[in-house]
Amino acid sequence: MGEIMTPRILSGFIELLPGAQLRFDEMRRIAEEVYESFGFVPLDTPAIELSEILLAKGGGETDKQMYRFTKGENDLALRFDLTVPLARYVAQHAGELSFPFKRYHIGKVYRGERPQRGRFREFYQADIDVVGDGSLNIMNDAEMPAIIYKVFTRWGITRFRIRINNRKLLGGFYESLGLGSLSAEIMRTADKLEKIGEEKVRAIFTDDLGIPADKADGILSFMAHSGTGDKTLAFLETLRGSNALYDEGLDELRKVVEGVRAFGVPDENFAVDLTISRGLDYYTGTVYETTLLDYPEIGSPCSGGRYDNLASNYTERRLPGVGISIGLSRLYWALCDMGLIDTEARRSTADVLVIPMTSDRAAAIAAAEAFRRAGVRTQVYFEEKKFKGKMNYANRLGVPFIAIIGEDELAAGEVSLKDMRSGEQNRMKPEEAAKLAADVLSAEKKRPIVAEK
RNA sequence: GUGGGUGUGGCGUAGUUGGCUAACGCGUCGGAUUGUGGUUCCGAAGACCGUGGGUUCGAGUCCCAUCACCCACCCCA
């Protein structure tokens, strides 16, 4: 035998213990259900692709943070996000897909950056995108927040706000100030407003970007009009006519706000925020960011936007799209860190643990099958342990029921079904026990995964 | 990539101005009259104090190097 080495995983990577993994997977499953309820189809693409494909966009940061390696002659890389693979996929299969193409993709992505608290090198994103052929109706932009609203509330999160903005509106506004060439820098700086404060942002505007003081103040007071839909829209209307791009952006933003409301998202869960712009990359219209109201420090757990031409690197076809991505791993991590997720209660999928007290195992196996036929997830305890050890195991797993089969039960062809929470215990036929357990379990209200305080 | 901090059993910590067999909690395992639990009590296993070198009669405690991890910046989920 070789020498024993310390078991460990790479920094920035995570794995969960059973209780935590179960909660994570429940969150994932809910996201999938909601996504599918809006007609999105699942997609799974390779984690590894040719570097050439994944780097087609050619961006500084992406280049630096991409996990890249060679295998034989091939220059390969791990996907950095799920959007670029989608672009490739849509371009490659455009002839076989029906547009608008709605797909969701929950998968791991990889970023070789320095790990930090709540930031990982391998993490899950839960993306949805709608891709059109030639054009894509603006109502799709309004549907995105509605979907996110449903996912979050079904998880048990209600104290959040989806913030919406439009880059045409911003770009047009800066153009009207004669600052069109600085548009990208201004957006990037304004994005930090919440984090570093108005003073510093103003200083960067005037000192670093050379923007005249009056215009810097103009930008800041413009952005200060962020807020609930109607008020902000009313303000934005006062600037209509100053710039064609601005007007176009305003029209879009208005339709999105009205649409989001039509989808039933409450006013407290969304707002127009004129500071957000979402990095520099492909977004060209609507942009989204989400804030957990009680924990703004964790950043946006869900963001996205509209892009005019998703797959321009891979096809001549013009494929506009809109999408949004939940940073599932980081959000989950943050919720656990804040103590909002109980990772201890259930550490098994089993609803029933069958405990044979005699050497007979056949009756236990048969009883377990009876439970399973009733749709109850069931495990048989096969090990030779004292009763206390068996009970302990049941407790540790957090199973709601145990079914004991001792000599008496065996002779009578029955089991003793015990509700571990109430302590109540009754002897009956396995089929009856299965039905009883199934009834109790299905009557129980599903508790949300996240318990907000 | 740039700057700062930390490094003691599986986890969280204690370890006085360097001094005898490195302590504690949690967890793990075993036991407390052989079919009823998460409590309590008792007991056990488990660390060459990240690694290498140096100073010293003597270092977990000082110095250097190295590695790892953490935090901030960058960027973002």
Image (tube, grey):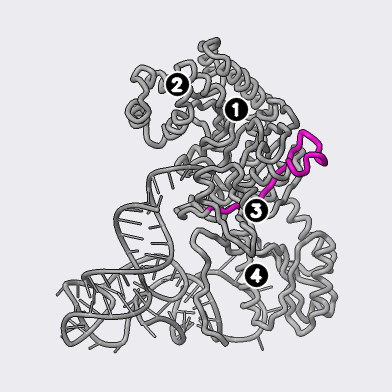
| C-alpha span from label 1 to label 2 | 18 Å
Q: Kindly check if marks 1 and 2 are in contact, taking CB atoms under 8 A apart as contact.
A: no
Distance in Å between CA atoms under marks 3 and 4: 48 Å
Question: At label 4, which amino acid type do we have?
Answer: Ala
Which residue sits at x=53%, y=23%?
A228
| Dot placed on the residue nearer the N-terminal end, 2 or 3 | 3
Which mark sits nearer the N-terminus, 3 or 4? 3
Q: Mark 2 points at which residue?
A: A179
Please state if A376 lies on the left or on the right of B38 as rendered. Answer: right
Q: Do labels 1 and 3 share a chain?
A: yes
**Identity of the residue drawn at 76% across and 63% down:** A377
Report the span colored magenta. A91-111
- Disc 2 and disc 4 in contact, CB within 8 angstroms: no
Q: Which of marks 1 and 3 is in front?
A: 3
- Residue of label 1: A285
Q: What residue is pinned by disc 4?
A: A394
Residue drawn at (61%, 44%), measured in percent from left and top? A56
Q: How far apart are marks 2 and 4 (CA)?
A: 67 Å
- Tag nearer the camera, 3 or 4: 3
- Crowding at dot 3, Cα within 10 Å, few <14 / some 14-19 / many 20+, comes out as some
Is residue A101 part of the magenta span, yes or no? yes
Dot 4: what SS?
Answer: helix
Judged left or right of residue A255, residue A194 is left
Earlier sequence position, callout 2 versus callout 4: 2
Disc nearer the start of the sequence (1/3): 3
Residue A448 seen from this side: no
